[in-house]
Image: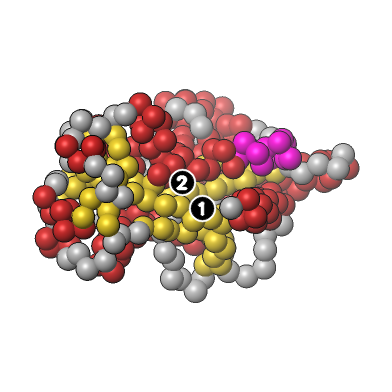
Amino acid sequence: MLEYFRLKVFRIVAEQASFRKASELLSITQPAVSQQVHALEEELGVTLFDRGGSRVSLTPAGMVLLRYAQRVAGISVEAERELAAMQGEMAGELRLGASTTVAQYILPRMLARFRRYHPRVAISVISGNTEWAVDALLRGEILAGVIEGPVSSAEIHKQKLLDDRMALIVPGAHAWAKQESIALEKLPEIPLLMRERGSGSRRVVESALRRAGMRMGRLEIEMELDTTGAIIAGVEAGLGAGFVSLVAVEKEQRMGSVKALPVTGLEIVRPITLIRRAGPQADGPAKAFEEFAAAEAKSAGRKR
C-alpha cells in the first residue's frame, strides 16, 4: 500500500472509534495499533485522541488530520489502481465483513482462491453476527459482507451464494450418538447450547423448529454462546447439544468427539448471502470480489 502506515493506522482507529476494531481490520495486535498512533502523535507533536472510556474520540487536531488522511488514502488507492491497470492487474483495498461462522469456516477458502487471481488486492476481514455485518455495511465500515442470516433492509442488495446445511450435534460419548436419528419430540430432553440473540444462526434454527411444530418454550436452553466454535467446544465438553453448520464440524466428526444427528421432521438449510449497499455495483476490488463469488456459486451449483 502506498499509504503511510502510521497514517493508515490512525485513520482506521478514527473511523472505527476503536483501537480493538482497528487491530482486527489491520490484522495486527491492539498494542501495536496503540504504538503506531503514539509514534505518530510524537512525530507531529499533537494529541490525536481523547482516550477516556471504552470508545476513543478525536481531538481537534485529530479531526483536522483525519480529513487529510482520508484524502491521502483515496489518492493512494487511485494511484495503485492506475499503476496496476498498466500491468493488467488489479490493486486496492477490499474490506469485508462476515458473520462469525462464515468468517471462520467458509470465507478463508474462498479468499484463498480469490487471491490467486488478484494477488495485489489488500484484504481485511472483520467478523460479528449478522446484525453487526448489516450495520457495518450501512455505516460504510465494510464494502461487502458474507452472512448466513436473513436481511430485510431495502438499503441492502443481496445475492445468494450457496446453501449451508445445519444439524444437531451431540457429544461423541452421549447415548444418542449411537443412534442414526432422533425424534423431534426428544429435543426437550437434552440441554441445548444456542447462539446469542441477533445471530443469523439463532434465527434460522428457531424458525426451522417452529415450522416443524416445536415450541421454543418447551426446550431447555442451557447456555447462549457467541460463536459456532464455542458451541462445538461446549458440546465436546458434555454441556449439551447444539445446532451448527455441518462444514464447521468436519474435523470433530472425524475425531469422534461429536456426532451430527438428523432430527426427524427437521431440516435446517440457510442461504449464505453476499450483501452490499443497494445501487450500482462498486468499482475495483469490491466489484471483482462480487463477480468472483457469484462465479464460484454458479460453479458449485453445476457440480451438485
The image quadrant of residue 51 is top left
Residue type, label 1: Val
Residue type, label 2: Val
The image quadrant of residue 233 is top left
Residue at image location 72% in from the left, 40% down from the top:
118
Of residue 294 and residue 144, the one placed in the foreground of this image is 294
Magenta stretch? 111-123
Q: Which residue is mark 2?
A: 102
Counting residues from the start of the chain, the first of labels 1 and 2 encountered is: 2
Residue at image location 70% in from the left, 43% down from the top:
92
Q: Which residue is mark 1?
A: 146
- SS of the residue under disc 2: helix
Of residue 293 and residue 256, the one placed in the foreground of this image is 256
Q: Is residue 185 magenta?
A: no
Question: Where residue 252 sits in the image (x, y, percent)?
Answer: 35, 31
Q: Residues within 10 Å of mark 2 (few under 14, many from 20)?
A: many
Q: Do tag 1 and tag 2 residues touch (Cβ < 8 Å)?
A: yes
